[in-house]
Amino acid sequence: MDNNVYQLNIVSDDTMQNLENYPNVDWIKAGIAILREQGPTCVNIDTLCEKTGKDLDAFNKAFNGLPSYLFAVLDYWYEKEVLAYIDMMDEITAEGEEVLIRMIEIKHNADKGDEVAIRNWALKCPNAHKALARVDRTRLDYTIGVFKEMGFSEAESNLRAKILYTSFIGLEYSSISASLEKRLEMAKLLCRRD
């Protein structure tokens, strides 16, 4: 691995403990695994019971039907993929451009399978789409804040953050790929003031 790449845990031990204590996490992880492996149409109570080795009564004690379960999956994913990363970024003692670089390195090296599965689900499900919009908005707001801390105006921060975030998503979910070095070059270009 490149010497310039920071060796950071993707999620801190405290955050991992909180995620493991998330209500009904075993059911939620099973649903995310089904989303990844088989797609959203396969997430049903029978498949969940089979995946967890539990029965319908256990499911009914944990959730008030499948819609309740699906909202729990989306809430868990928001905690894991957004709030956990923000907590981790807030622990970094660097500022400005260095925070962006570390953020890109961490996300570049992260497993993106859950995100791909949720984004695919959001194409067909209005509730998943709303949850995804919340994720995108929170991530974008955080990135805007980083640019503002670097001294860019509100308008410049908004524009730079949108370019960075949408290019990152585009590189991840299209046939166009970029190495970590290219992604960092793009971020550094957005941090320039000339």
Image (spheres, rainbow, N blue to C red):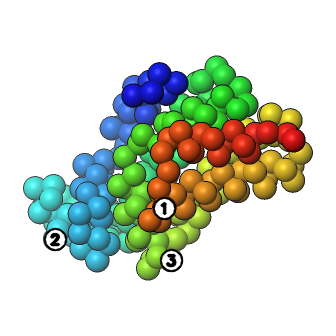
User: How far from the left and from the top, in percent, is residue 192?
Assistant: 79, 39
Q: How far apart are marks 3 and 1 (CA)?
A: 27 Å
Going by the image, does 68 lie left or right of 79?
left
Sequence-wise first label, 3 or 2: 2
Sequence-wise first label, 3 or 1: 3
User: How far from the left and from the top, in percent, is residue 170?
Assistant: 54, 61
Q: How far apart are marks 3 and 2 (CA)?
A: 23 Å
Q: Is mark 2 on a helix, strand or loop?
A: helix
Q: Is mark 1 on a helix, strand or loop?
A: loop
Task: Nearest to the eye among marks 1 and 2: give it.
Answer: 1
**Image quadrant where residue 19 sits:** top left
User: How far from the left and from the top, in percent, is residue 146?
Assistant: 73, 38
Which quarter of the rendering shows the N terminus?
top left
Please tell me which residue is depicted at 75% across the width and 51% down the height of the picture: 160
Residue topped by disc 3: 126
Sequence-wise first label, 1 or 2: 2
Q: Give the residue type that dot 2 points to.
A: Asp
Residue 37 visible in the picture: yes
Residue topped by disc 2: 46
Residue topped by disc 1: 176
Residue placed most toward the observer, 25 or 126: 126
